[in-house]
Amino acid sequence: MAVLPTAPASILADYHELMNLAGYREVIDPSVDTALKINISWHFFYPGSSTTPWQLEGVVRAMAKDGYDPALIHGCHNRTVVIDARLGERENKQIDVVEAHGLRNIHLYEEDEEWLPVREAVGDLASRFLCLNDVYPQGFHIPARFVGENIIHLPTVKTHVFTTTTGAMKNAFGGLLNERRHWTHPVIHETLVDLLMIQQHIHRGVFAAMDGTFAGDGPGPRCMIPRVGNVILASADQVAIDAVAAKLMGFDPLSIRYIRLAHDLGLGCGDPREIEIVGDPAVAGRSWGFVGPFRKMTFAARMQHKIYWGPLRRPVEWSLRTFLAPWAYLASVLYHDSFWYPYKAKRQMAEALASPWGRLFAGWEQARTDGRGYPEIAARPAVAFRTGWRAFLTSLRILWTCLREAPEVAMRLSRRSDAAGVHGSGS
């Protein structure tokens, strides 16, 4: 488990050192494909929410320097019903890095991507799942390309209103489960443990490089209080990296259910006292004293808690498993994209955007590296140009996309189309 302090002037060299300190070459087989699992927690840029461009750049450059073939490396995205990954990769400037290095860019939900039944991929392991057999009694599918691939997760250090923190383990959530992953929210901690079992079975190697240059406090993973952390972390142990990140944020890792469950099952080490830190142990030993996700929850987060674990579970949660589910997707987009980001994000982001990392993001397209990092960065802070009316108008398009691509709507339209075809062939 490696932890290093960093700055824009040394970020690329630091990622190379970090990954080698964490022993990634012992885990990531250079002879097979490696998926760089990019995290997009919000399709709008928000500090701490999604994979940073320098995080992705640092990992790609490190691999190239160590002899990995770029033809065997690809960016990897999932889609959710409330996040537009195509918009997100542009707004967060991740696509700039992918294209600059000539990497393939895989969106797992595109029509030419094959998904296979999980039992075909993991066999008897499925009998050990903590919850997924109950959530999906008819089974579920996972991306076929993942079987035999390496995967490097690219999460950030941040909080989450469902799981207290979110990092390497939860970064698999979108990639391995389909668009009905919200069915697992009432048992989200157990779900993350089941997904880690699957990863350890199907992937050739599993690794994570976590970015804490920005970090997110408060009701994450979207409407957060951005912090500047100036730290990066890496490990082949997904439990350990999440535990160390949790401790940095000021939480007891073993009090977080998904970390405790994975630790007790031997899937990794969640006890910081037992984790060997290389790089800069003093940095890993700090506590940022985050307030956490539950003290100042947004209206949307409070309602989600009532629906999944509170008094609204019985009267409302059932609807999320039916054709009525799109009401929840629309409510999420209206709150987060049409209201919160246009009218609250600019003030919340101001301090982070004025930091060296905010200025590096602002001038990313023109940033010049000396090989170690970015010694000269933009003098002006990043501009949140999609706040106000710009963000509101964009949210209306997202709202329409959300409704059109909702799996429940698509299924009903497919059934109507099939029925029309049957009637048509019989006339």
Image (spheres, rainbow, N blue to C red):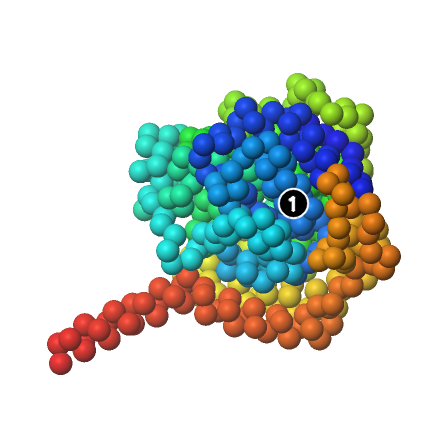
Query: Toward the viewer: 234 or 303?
Result: 234
Instruction: Report crowding for label 1: few under 14, some 14 to 19, many 20 or more residues within 10 A (C-alpha).
Output: some
Q: Secondary structure at mark 1?
A: helix
Q: Quadrant of the N terminus?
A: top right
Residue 248 locus on image (x, y percent): 75, 34
The answer to whether any part of residue 174 appears in the image is no
In the displayed structure, does residue 78 sit left or right of residue 333? left
Instruction: Name the residue: 76% across, 24% down.
Output: 281
Instruction: Name the residue: 71% across, 49% down.
Output: 48
Number of callouts: 1
Residue 367 locus on image (x, y percent): 75, 53
Relative height, residue 401 to residue 348 (above, below): below
Residue 145 locus on image (x, y percent): 40, 43
Q: Quadrant of the C terminus?
A: bottom left
Residue 277 locus on image (x, y percent): 70, 22
Residue 228 location, quadrant: top right
Outermost residue to the left: 426
Instruction: Name the residue: 29% across, 67% down.
Output: 415
In the displayed structure, does residue 192 sit left or right of residue 231? left
The answer to whether any part of residue 44 appears in the image is yes
Residue at mark 1: 57
Outermost residue to the right: 379
Instruction: Name the residue: 71% across, 75% down.
Output: 389
Outermost residue to the bottom: 427
Which amino acid type is marked by label 1?
Answer: Glu
Query: Toward the viewer: 95 or 293?
Result: 95
